[in-house]
Image: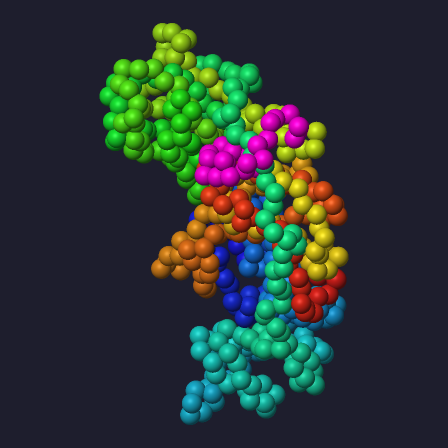
Amino acid sequence: GWFQQWGQPISIRKTSDVAYSVAEWFAGGGAYHAYYMWHGGNNYGRIAASGVTTLYADDVCLHADGTPNEPKYTQLSRLQHIIADRAEVLLSQDSIRTTIPYWNGKAWANGTSQFVYSYPPSTHFVISQATSPLFVLFRNQNISMNDHSVRIYDDNMTLLWYSADYSDIASNTTELVPVVVGPLDWQTWSESSVKSNLSVISSPNPIGQLNITNDETIYLWYRRNVTLKQASADTILRVQTRIANALLFFLNGQYLGEFDDHNHQAGSAEAFIVLDLSHFNSNQQYLFEILSISFGLFSGVYANTFEQKGIDGNVWLDGQLLLDNTTETNFWNHQKGLIGEYLQIYTEQGSSKVDWDTQWTKGINQPITWFQARFDLDHLIREDKNANPILLDALGLNRGHAFINGNDLGLYWLIQGICENNQPCCCQHAQTNCLKPTQRYYHIPPDWLRPKNNLITIFDDLGAPSPGSVGLVQRVVKSSKINDFFL
């Protein structure tokens, strides 16, 4: 497996290739294998590294939500059982490596890519490193080998495991079932509906985001007054910013557009966008606002002094460098976080601190807008929410953060995965989910949920196109050879 990045498809590594690589490692004397990863895991809250999705990895033995990824899960579990059962034999001696012949179509030939690693008295790994299928000869038996494959035999030549054969393992072992009937009864509230009275830090030039937020929130507002020299339909805006960062732009509270970079890197980036300001007046002063959104730190934690977020340099609008060393009237004001965050409106106590509008359709496609609803778990297919997890189906949203009963589920983003012709990195063989959301479903830890009156809160920074489509589903495991030892 490998970690998943926003805007990319799901990369797939074939089960047979993982199985071959792991078995070959143990055959040659390996004592430990980490898999990276066995369980995909999730980045709840703000812990995701730069550009990495809320699910860390999904094409691994256990999906990010904890359900088995078949046939990979069972095939690798079987191998681990064999290795564990024979651990004393494998660890107590060096292997005996022998080259074995292969059939070249006319005769048995000396192999250069075919070997047996023997651990007397009980275990033999027959390995073919060839790039095409062939037959090998071992103990007077003709053995069929796929390309890059491993067979494990006992001393009686009973086949214990074959990396390329998992035909008896079902691959479609789960299904998604709605657990809330009908659309959620949303209410909405906008960050722009009230004037902020949160404290600000003023400076003649923009300050790096982490210097103010200390990574305690992913949001930072930059505000200052501007006078447009020539308001036009093709006004150029340039901002020196950082990789794995988004910027939303507003003029007098009106949303103008956004820039985002979602690469898994650290370093500088430059936002260069064209804004339509033709409906504003030239030579008139306006409030210019930038909401900076961090997509995570490259290291994953705020434990360094060299990483930055937000505006990392200068801002140019309408040909003007927005820098003022002469008067405080045009200083940049920096506000840490959102009003909704400060009031904790995603909690039971904080929810009553704002005036929610039950006509939630007013919030459709509106940037920096909150949605809130309640739901019951009356339609669970199975009560065990660990083995059959509950997921947020974020279809209908855009980008933002979701909260369940006050707990931060992490960043959601319905950005499409763009498939490319070049080979995926890190042993991956194929790409799926092309032109579909990189991540649509978000795992909800079962201890965050209660049978009745669950509170779900959404903050969508870009504007949710269809909140009524949001749902909660249960991934039901239909059949799987799960062994608790490997969970």
387 falls in the magenta region: no
Is residue 334 or residue 459 the one in the foreground?
Answer: 459
Task: Please state the horizontal and vertical placement of residue 355, each as a whole percent of the image.
Answer: 60, 27
Q: Is residue 236 visible?
A: no
From the viewer's perspective, is residue 225 above or below residue 237? above
Residue 113, percent across and down?
Answer: 48, 76
Question: Which sits in the foreground, 291 or 307?
Answer: 291
Q: Which residue shows up at 46% across the image and 58% down it?
A: 433
Q: Establish if 197 lies above or below 37.
A: above
| Residue 343 location, quadrant | top right
| Residue 278 seen from this side | yes
For image coordinates 45% across by 47% down, the residue present is 415
Q: Which range of residues does the magenta coloring cover? A: 350-371
Residue 204 picture quarter = top left
Quadrant placement of the N terminus? bottom right
Choose between 433 and 453: the one closer to the eye. Answer: 453
Q: Is residue 360 magenta?
A: yes
Residue name at image x 52 percent, y 16 percent: 200
- In this view, 324 is above or below 349: above
